[in-house]
DNA sequence: ATAATTTGCTAAATCCGTTTAGTTTTTCTA
DNA sequence: TAGAAAAACTAAACGGATTTAGCAAATTAT
């Protein structure tokens, strides 16, 4: 590997001081009263030799890295990868790079990742936090590391966060199903104490109660293998034949749910209406198209970046923390509309 | 932000030399004949103070960063995000982190990214290369930077790459449709001179010719907006009413294609059989389920990591380059099978 | 003609580990 | 008991930038 050229090399070649070069390259020539002649000479040389600063050395000295650590649950999940893409795009425009990692909802791995990122002097974090990293998050606060939580948050810790109104989303879905004339509306969710799941469940329960119906909830363990999920949903549907509509709490559950529905040859929406939390590009072209509670991805990622950059630019303790709760949108498609 | 504790701090506190600490922390205590007593004293102190090495300083000195740069076309695409996830998982187990970026198939952005990564001393690259970065890739070779191309490659440049057999994949798809009794098999693809697209087209053409049929190809411009794609596919189907089967060259095209098919109220597979390149979790639960040419994701990512690590561990010029061409799999579902 | 500024640039410290080449102290050998 | 060898550490250079404090020469002011 060719060793790269450094400022010292340039300094030697041009017989000037390294400091001078640094000033010129950083656009501080005027400020430091470097003559235009010398400045252009250096710039020309830099271009000719195709010199690039060593970002590590720069980061080491300045404490800044121009890197943002993105810690998501699973980058292969369409929701997270879409957010990642949008965040990356925005960050890139501001000169920032993204290092991402998937937590797999494993607190130990997550804590390792956070520390790894700290050791690299990332300028900020965007985190979907699994349960069990509360202490680590408190440490981030205490150490005044800029970061934003998203998708879920810790109610007992004062932090910035950007989430959607999961309670309202679930309510909207149920209310829509009620308005469409469905009476036995089930909720299939993951057994999880994360806020986004808790809120979705709460929204479902409240809306069902308000409509005067009976809540029917299937909670599936986080660790279940896909085939296991299909079986659990199948069993649930078989046991509760009166269920005429189901709200899936996540995209992934909907996927396995569809499999269960297909296996039982149930027709959507005639035998069973379906609404899924989180929209997906393919839902629009399903047969029938699937109704979804859609998270405002663009809005979400813009807010994440904005809140993070605000926190990054602020000095110590920039006032109180920012809590953004964005409204989801119910996209009604045929899967939840009674055919006449 | 609390400033973090450094080896110098520890050295001062424990009244020993910084070098000693470095050796101990790096597990070279035995080798350097540091007494067990001192070693444990340091280790205990490190744990107590929750000290973490500054990875930047480490990288700067050693030239290694334990980071791999992953440059994909679009992380929001299920194919790339799945690969990313699998790669990240494997890399993580080996103590490596991933920095990723989306090229959006923009050569200028890609070159910037590569240079950014070089400046961060990434230990290796995994790249889906857009056309127009040939010179940059040649530079990587010349500078002996470890890297692997995937999804596509540059035939005229000797590099490592891991791809799938796109020609065979397209052939399999067409042969399957022919065997099922379809006669007017169209191919809807992107106008692109990237190898993976060229190979898919070639495979389609060869198989069609071998069957004695007439090729019917719709090439869609890369830059077309989604709605534009739908319209182009619609127009194509309307104009070629005799087409009884279609092979979509990518997942994304399939998505827009389904929209066009739905708008014309065509039934799959009775009016039109469908096969898509790249499988997707949702294809299994479509109504009807969609036949797909599936890339072996696990195999692909394992090979990518293996080839890259081999290159990374090898000294200068480790022999000739590695070309892996993995076999795709045709997953036959109802969308391409004539109903009896 | 001398003092005060301004202009143009540089030396050296700093960020924080790693690593080479020792140095000192202790133990062993002859 | 002197000298060799081993044990236990350490000093200092290094990687590659940034940044503060300051010096020398050229101008301007008095």
Image (cartoon, coloured by chain):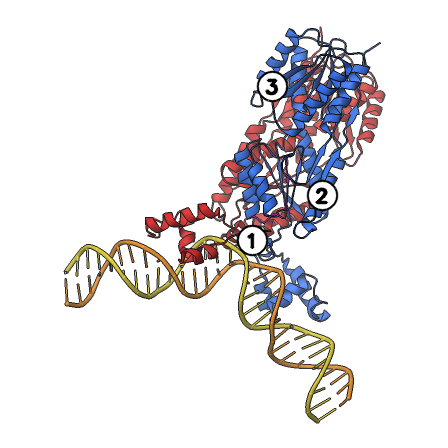
Chain colours: A red, B blue, C orange, D yellow
Instruction: Look at mark 3 in the image and give the residue it sits on.
Output: B220
Q: Is residue B151 above or below residue B38?
A: above
As helix, strand or loop, the secondary structure at mark 2 comes to helix
Instruction: Look at mark 2 in the image and give the residue it sits on.
Output: B307
- Report x, y in % for residue A82: 62, 30
- What residue is shown at x 58% (from left), y 36% (from top)? B134
Closest to the observer, A320 or B254: B254
In three-dimensional space, the C-alpha distance between marks 3 and 1, rounded to whole angstroms, equals 44 Å
Q: Are marks 2 and 1 in contact (CB under 8 Å)?
A: no
- Report x, y in % for residue B242: 71, 7
Q: First in sequence: mark 2 or mark 3? A: 3
Asked if residue B127 is among those painted magenta in the image, a careful observer would answer yes
Q: Dot 2: few (<14), some (14–19), or many (≥20) neighbours within 10 Å?
A: many
Q: Dot 1: few (<14), some (14–19), or many (≥20) neighbours within 10 Å?
A: few
Left or right: A116, with B269 as reference point: left
Left or right: D27, with A102 as reference point: left
> Same chain, marks 2 and 3?
yes
Asked if residue B308 is among those painted magenta in the image, a careful observer would answer no
Q: Is residue B228 above or below residue B281?
A: above
- Report x, y in % for residue D26: 24, 58
Instruction: Look at mark 1 in the image and give the residue it sits on.
Output: A3
Q: Is residue A66 above or below residue C30?
A: above
As helix, strand or loop, the secondary structure at mark 3 comes to strand
- What residue is shown at x 68% (from left), y 67% (from top)? B41
- Can you see residue A278? no
- Report x, y in % for residue A193: 71, 37
**Quadrant in which the C terminus of chain A appears:** top right
Left or right: B59, with B241 as reference point: left
Chain assignment, label 2: B
Magenta span: B120-128
Q: Quadrant of residue C16?
A: bottom right
* 3 vs 1, front mark: 1
């Amino acid at each position: 590997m060719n060793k790269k050229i450094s400022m010292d090399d340039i300094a030697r070649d041009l017989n000037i001081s390294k400091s001078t070069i640094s000033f010129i390259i950083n656009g501080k020539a005027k400020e430091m009263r470097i003559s235009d002649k010398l400045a252009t000479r250096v710039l020309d040389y830099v271009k000719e030799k195709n010199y690039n600063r060593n970002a590590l050395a720069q980061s080491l000295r300045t404490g800044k890295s121009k890197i943002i650590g993105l810690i998501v649950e699973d980058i292969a999940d369409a929701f997270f990868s879409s957010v990642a893409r949008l965040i990356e795009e925005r960050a890139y425009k501001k000169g920032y790079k993204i290092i991402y990692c998937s937590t797999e909802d494993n607190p130990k791995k997550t804590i390792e990742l956070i520390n790894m990122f700290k050791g690299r002097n990332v300028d900020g974090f965007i985190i979907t936090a699994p349960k069990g990293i509360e202490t680590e998050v408190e440490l981030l606060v205490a150490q005044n590391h800029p970061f934003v939580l998203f998708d879920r948050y810790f109610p007992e810790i004062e932090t910035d966060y950007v989430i959607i109104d999961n309670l309202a989303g679930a309510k909207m879905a149920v209310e829509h199903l009620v308005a469409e004339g469905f009476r036995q509306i089930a909720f299939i969710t993951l057994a999880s104490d994360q806020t986004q799941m808790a809120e979705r469940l709460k929204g479902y329960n409240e809306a069902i109660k308000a409509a005067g119906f009976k809540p029917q909830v299937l909670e599936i363990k986080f660790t279940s293998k896909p085939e296991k999920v299909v079986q659990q949903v199948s069993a649930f549907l078989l046991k509760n034949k009166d269920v005429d509509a189901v709200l899936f709490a996540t995209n992934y559950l909907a996927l396995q749910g569809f499999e269960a529905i297909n296996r039982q040859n149930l027709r959507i929406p005639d035998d069973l209406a379906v609404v899924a939390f989180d929209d997906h590009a393919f839902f629009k072209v399903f047969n029938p198209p699937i109704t979804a509670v859609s998270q405002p991805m663009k809005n979400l990622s813009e807010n994440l970046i904005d809140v993070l950059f605000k926190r990054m630019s602020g000095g110590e303790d920039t006032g109180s923390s920012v809590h953004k709760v964005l409204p989801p949108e119910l996209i009604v498609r045929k899967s939840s509309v009674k055919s006449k």
